[in-house]
Image (spheres, rainbow, N blue to C red):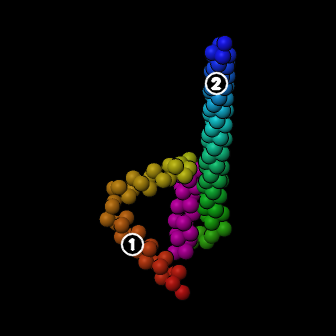
Amino acid sequence: MANPNISDVKNKVQDAGAKAAEQVKDTASSLTDKAKDVASNVADRARDAASNVGQRAEDLTERAGAGVRHLGEAVRERGPHGGYVGSATSAVADTLERGGPYIEQEGLSGMADDLTTLIRKNPIPSLLIGIGLGFFLARLTRS
């Protein structure tokens, strides 16, 4: 008669073990789903933050372009109009007035693309300018 009781206990232990394993599996699945949701939310927030930073940078660049254009107009209006100084003032004003809309329209990404293209088309002068700027900065910071 001892065997049926041992068999019953064994079956109960196996059932309890199966139930516990099922609960662990369900809990693990639930935790995995929650972790995926949290990761997705974090990724969405990071993407939104990066988008906001990028948009702010583009807005600031657009405002800077407008400021450069207005500076060109102010130089033209207030600067001398005759002689060598007048010619130089006019050239500076022209450059500023053309540069402002370029900055406004292209933004940071467009200017970076243009700079990349310029460097690819002129690698040796770009390298020499980089070396010169490095030398200048080293001398400037060397005190």
Q: Residue at x 66, y 37 (%)?
A: 38
Q: Position of residue 135 (x, y in %)?
A: 43, 78
Q: Position of residue 140 (x, y in %)?
A: 52, 81
Q: Residue at x 66, y 68 (%)?
A: 78
Residue type (three-letter) at the residue carrying disc 2: Gly
Q: Nearer the viewer, mark 1 or mark 2?
A: 2
Nearest to the observer: residue 67 or residue 132: 132
Give the magenta part as a residue range.
Answer: 84-104
Quadrant, the N terminus: top right
Label 1, label 2: how far apart the Cα atoms are? 72 Å
Residue at the left extreme of this rendering = 124
Residue 139 falls left or right of residue 47? left
Q: Which residue is mark 1?
A: 131
Nearest to the observer: residue 64 or residue 27: 27
Determine crowd level at label 2: few under 14, some 14-19, many 20+ residues with C-alpha closer than 10 A. few
Nearest to the observer: residue 59 or residue 24: 24
Q: Are marks 1 and 2 in contact (CB under 8 Å)?
A: no
Residue 137 vertical placement versus 34 (above, below): below
The quadrant in which residue 30 appears is top right
Secondary element at tag 2: helix
Q: Residue at x 52, y 49 (%)?
A: 109
Secondary element at tag 1: helix
Q: Which residue is mark 2?
A: 17
Q: Residue at x 53, y 81 (%)?
A: 141
Q: Position of residue 128 (x, y in %)?
A: 36, 70
55 magenta-colored: no
